[in-house]
């Protein structure tokens, strides 16, 4: 194994403050309250984990108190943009559902989250598991933490977590109705060695097994009682750091800390209130009034809020978040013009990515004010996922770079050549769940398509009843725009977008991409693996199966009240256990 082997990087996660600014997998600061998805780190001095205090006093044993200066108690307040379609993490693909799951359920592993870690480079670390071992990368033994307990809520009543709970949850993840079963098809067998030990057998050696266990899209450990003894679509009981203390649809979630949580001393606060506030203007007003502690702020409001409330803390991050234009599957529209690559290339070249970035992220104004903001372009892998992202503007993109460049005249030539000019179709997206930045870019893309000589009719869809349950899963006609799930391990993108995943948005296959996906999934040398992943991005660019766009590519901003401490970064949907357990209120 080479020095660039994945496993050799296990302790190589520390980065400079400047590096932290450049990439994070936060699922869209400014999309939903940071408690659901994690918080970012910015270009200014990070807020300290605590105000300056005297050195910790030694305990009787002579060991410093690790929590000296931390104030416990209180309720931290956030907002969410809407209700989850269901509370069951195996019930759908909604980020709101997975965000809820991260409060009450545990995963075997989680994403490392500490102030000195770039979350986009952070490796998995144990959550419910105490350790995982493998001699060959193909057979893995995973142990559950001794004494880890579920919530003391009937009918589970605080019993210890066992291997049976993990096996039950694995069965749910891989069941025929599971939306994410295709993501774990390389696991051929899971069995209990004893009540606290499990053995996972894979079809080939892989360096990303622990990333899979840490993926907040996949294995949530639910108690066996969730089959028949309580309804997981309406409540949640698990071993996570937070106990569900109340849920009023369209109003709020309330959580209280799990007093027997297996991470010693955490959480610091007693509870969390997550108010459901769909409109950004109302969320901003609540934050300005001091009624909430954390809020995602639109770029155009950053300078005003900084001026009006100079003590507010800021984190500016580039989400590892892909937005993309996608097209209905061939079985839905067999004769549609987008079955021809020239149409898809034309749509890409008809969109001005620089203008979209300015529209969504106010690059010029914020740079003029001295803030560090980015103007990179998403590829099939989002720009914030710098470890695997291929820069569309770089020489490494090769000849396919031209399909990312704004060239309306060439786009029209392509459409004319194939006789597609004037084509009428439905252009669809959802609004008010992903925030105003997404809404503005989605609307602008519709206008770009119109200006290219096409005739789209816009349909703004309800998120729960239509977009996430139908359009996102490929059950639609026409052209659509949306966000891809922010997979914390890059290998998650390819089964979803090109494989057997039932949520494959276009139901397409490409033999070259399938072959490259198989190679990258088992390659242990990181440089070689990166080249496979770059080549997948080049193939997608040539065909524009998915047209990458700019929502999620710019610098997003999260504001924190001055009293919030313990701010750390994470990526994906695991914020309630990776970040929020470290927060405390200095008031």
Image: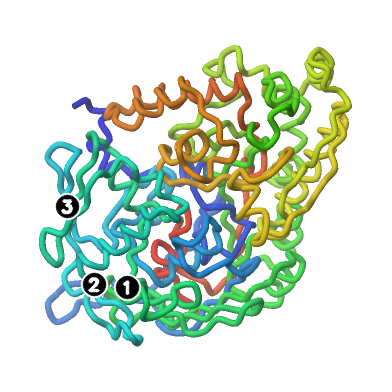
Residue 96 visible (yes or no):
yes
Q: Is residue 75 above or below residue 328?
A: below
The image position of residue 136, as x and y in percent, is: 15, 36
Sort mark 1 into few (<14), some (14-19) or many (20+) by Cα contacts within 10 Å. many
Gap between marks 2 and 3, in whole Å? 16 Å
Looking at the figure, which quarter contains the N terminus? top left
Camera-nearest residue between 492 and 211: 492
Determine whether, in the image, residue 223 is placed left or right of residue 426.
Answer: left
Mark before the other along the chain sequence, 2 or 3: 2
Disc 1 designates what residue? 239
Secondary structure found at label 2: loop
Disc number for residue 212: none
Disc number for residue 161: 2
Q: Dividing the picture into quarters, in which one does residue 108 lie? A: bottom left
The image position of residue 394, as x and y in percent, is: 57, 20
Mark before the other along the chain sequence, 1 or 3: 3
Determine whether, in the image, residue 443 is placed left or right of residue 94.
Answer: right
Residue visible at 48% across and 24% down in the picture: 536
Disc 3 designates what residue? 199
């Amino acid at each position: 194994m080479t020095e660039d082997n994945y496993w050799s990087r296990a302790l190589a996660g520390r980065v400079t403050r400047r590096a932290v600014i450049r990439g994070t997998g936060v699922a869209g600061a400014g999309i939903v309250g940071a408690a659901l998805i994690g918080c970012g780190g910015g270009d200014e001095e990070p807020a300290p984990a605590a105000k300056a205090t005297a050195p910790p006093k030694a305990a009787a044993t002579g060991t410093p108190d690790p929590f000296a200066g931390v104030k416990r108690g209180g309720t931290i307040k956030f907002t969410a943009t809407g209700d989850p379609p269901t509370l069951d993490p195996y019930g759908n693909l909604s980020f709101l559902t997975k965000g809820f799951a991260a409060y009450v359920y545990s995963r075997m592993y989680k994403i490392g989250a500490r102030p000195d870690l770039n979350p986009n480079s952070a490796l998995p670390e144990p959550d419910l598991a105490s350790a995982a071992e493998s001699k060959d990368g193909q057979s893995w033994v995973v142990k559950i933490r001794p004494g880890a307990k579920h919530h003391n809520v009937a009918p589970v009543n605080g019993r210890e977590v066992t291997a049976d709970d993990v096996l039950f949850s694995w069965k749910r993840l891989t069941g025929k109705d599971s939306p994410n079963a295709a993501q774990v098809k390389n696991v051929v067998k899971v069995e209990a060695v004893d009540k606290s030990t499990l053995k996972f057998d894979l079809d080939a050696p892989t360096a990303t097994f622990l990333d899979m266990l840490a993926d907040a899209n996949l294995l949530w450990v639910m108690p066996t009682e969730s089959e028949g003894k309580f309804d997981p679509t309406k409540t949640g009981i698990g071993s996570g750091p937070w106990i569900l203390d109340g849920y009023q649809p369209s109003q709020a979630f309330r959580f209280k800390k799990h007093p027997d949580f297996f991470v010693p001393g955490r959480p610091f606060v007693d509870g969390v209130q997550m108010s459901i506030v769909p409109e950004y203007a109302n969320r901003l007003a609540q934050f300005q009034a001091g009624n909430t502690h954390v809020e995602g702020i639109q770029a155009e409001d950053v300078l005003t809020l900084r001026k009006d409330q100079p003590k507010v803390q800021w984190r500016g991050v580039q989400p590892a978040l892909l937005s993309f234009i996608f097209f209905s599957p061939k079985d839905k529209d067999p004769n549609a013009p987008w079955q021809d690559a020239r149409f898809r290339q034309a749509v890409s070249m008809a969109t001005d990515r620089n203008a979209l970035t300015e529209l969504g992220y106010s690059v010029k104004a914020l740079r003029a004010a001295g803030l560090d903001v980015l103007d990179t372009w998403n590829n099939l892998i989002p720009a914030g996922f710098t470890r695997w992202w291929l820069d569309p503007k770089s020489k490494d993109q090769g000849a396919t770079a031209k399909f990312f460049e704004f060239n309306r005249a060439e786009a029209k030539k392509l459409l004319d050549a194939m006789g597609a000019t004037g084509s009428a179709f439905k252009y669809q997206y959802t609004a008010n769940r992903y925030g105003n930045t997404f809404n503005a870019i989605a609307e602008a893309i519709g206008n770009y398509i119109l200006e290219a000589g096409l005739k789209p009719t816009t349909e703004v869809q309800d998120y729960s009843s239509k977009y996430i349950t139908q359009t996102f899963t490929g059950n639609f006609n026409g052209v659509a725009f949306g966000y891809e799930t922010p997979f914390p391990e890059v290998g998650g993108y390819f089964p979803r977008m090109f494989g057997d995943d039932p949520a494959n948005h276009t139901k397409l296959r490409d033999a070259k991409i399938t072959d490259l996906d198989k190679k990258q999934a088992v390659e242990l040398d990181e440089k070689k693996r990166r080249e496979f992943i770059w080549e997948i991005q080049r193939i997608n660019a040539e065909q524009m199966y998915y047209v990458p766009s700019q929502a999620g590519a710019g610098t997003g901003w999260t504001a924190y009240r001055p009293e919030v401490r313990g701010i750390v970064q994470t990526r994906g949907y695991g914020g309630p256990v990776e970040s929020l357990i470290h927060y405390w209120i200095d008031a």
